[in-house]
């Protein structure tokens, strides 16, 4: 057992010493509140004070937030990415993304991508359509987290297509700009989904796999690092950013 432990330590040390990997992180948030909607999922909730401290840190480190539309413009060669890009994403469409998160985001002059479950919109604890529209007007990108948040890899072909198509159509026909990005519910994805998303006119999709993204990364399998409720303040947040780098190095081996 001791030999295995030493071997793991040596491998980690080698990875740590490798040169800094290329690419930018995409962060995955859920709720930003002191009072989570469901206490069983409290781990997915970042208190506003911690969130503000995280944005202060990103600003001090010279990061510039972009949307995934900005990323696709860069992939297609229409726009350049800033020096140190980062994407902030919020899954599930919780009401506090508007009431708590948005004011902190705007105070830092930052942007984000909000992935909504369309059949939850307007329900207690979730965003309303008017709030979503207002967030878009203020420069945030709205994406789909499907109609019902079911893991797409477990659905039959017809139902799977309906989940990605109907959520997009609902948001667009309600007056939002074209919906270009999807967040896989529960992070469940496989290579077959890329074809489906292309056919349904999505340009990007985010997973729950840690890593960094470059203009060459498959846009339907973008890496994201999960930001949980921190137990060790900003140190834990820095660790999460480091985790994205660590996995990027690992994939490059
Ligand atoms: Zn989700």
Image (cartoon, rainbow, N blue to C red):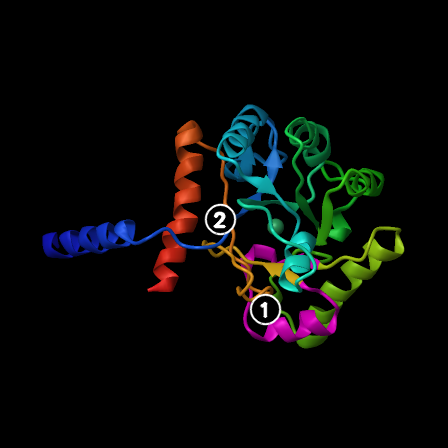
Pick the front one: 22 or 139: 22
Q: Residues within 10 Å of mark 1 (few under 14, many from 20)?
A: few
Residue name at image x 61 percent, y 29 percent: 33
Q: Is residue 200 magenta?
A: yes
Left or right: 21 in relation to 64: left
Residue 231 visible: no
Assess mark 2: CB under 8 A from ligand 1?
no
Label 2: element kind: strand
Q: Which residue is mark 2?
A: 225
Specify start and end residues of the magenta stretch as a single range. 181-203
Residue name at image x 62 percent, y 71 percent: 194
Residue 73 location (% of width, % of height): 68, 58
Q: Is residue 201 magenta?
A: yes
Pick the front one: 74 or 114: 74
Residue 89 location (% of width, % of height): 61, 45
Q: Which residue is mark 1?
A: 154
Residue 95 location (% of width, % of height): 72, 35
Is there CB contact under 8 Å for labels 2 and 1? no
Residue 219, image quadrant: bottom right
Q: CA distance from mark 2 to mark 1?
A: 23 Å
Residue 241 visible: yes
Q: Residues within 10 Å of mark 2 (few under 14, many from 20)?
A: many
Left or right: 212 in relation to 182: left
Residue 135, image quadrant: top right
Q: Nearer the viewer, mark 2 or mark 1?
A: 2
Residue name at image x 66 percent, y 48 percent: 67
Label 1: element kind: helix
Q: Quadrant of the C terminus?
A: bottom left
Residue 91 location (% of width, % of height): 63, 47
Residue 250, label in figure: none
């Amino acid at each position: 057992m001791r030999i295995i432990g030493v071997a793991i330590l040596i491998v980690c040390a080698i990875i740590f010493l490798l040169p800094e990997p290329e690419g930018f992180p995409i962060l995955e948030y859920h709720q930003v509140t002191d009072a989570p909607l469901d206490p069983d999922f409290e781990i997915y909730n970042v208190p506003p004070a911690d969130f503000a401290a995280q944005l202060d840190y990103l600003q001090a480190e010279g990061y510039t937030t972009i949307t995934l539309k900005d990323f696709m413009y860069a992939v297609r060669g229409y726009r350049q990415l800033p020096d140190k890009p980062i994407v902030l994403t919020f899954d599930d469409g919780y009401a506090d993304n508007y009431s708590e998160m948005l004011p902190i985001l705007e105070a830092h002059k930052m942007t984000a991508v909000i992935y909504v479950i369309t059949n939850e919109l307007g329900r207690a604890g979730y965003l309303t359509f008017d709030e979503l529209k207002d967030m878009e007007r203020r420069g945030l990108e709205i994406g789909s987290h499907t109609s019902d948040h079911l893991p797409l890899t477990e659905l039959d072909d017809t139902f799977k297509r309906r989940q990605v198509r109907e959520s997009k159509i609902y948001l667009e026909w309600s007056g939002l700009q074209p919906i270009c990005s999807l967040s896989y519910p529960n992070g469940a994805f496989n290579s077959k989904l890329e074809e489906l998303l292309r056919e349904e006119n999505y340009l990007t999709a985010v997973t729950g796999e840690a890593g960094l993204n470059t203009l060459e990364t498959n846009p339907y399998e973008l890496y994201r690092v999960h930001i949980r409720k921190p137990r060790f303040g900003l140190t834990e947040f820095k660790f999460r950013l480091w985790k994205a780098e660590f996995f990027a190095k690992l994939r490059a081996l």
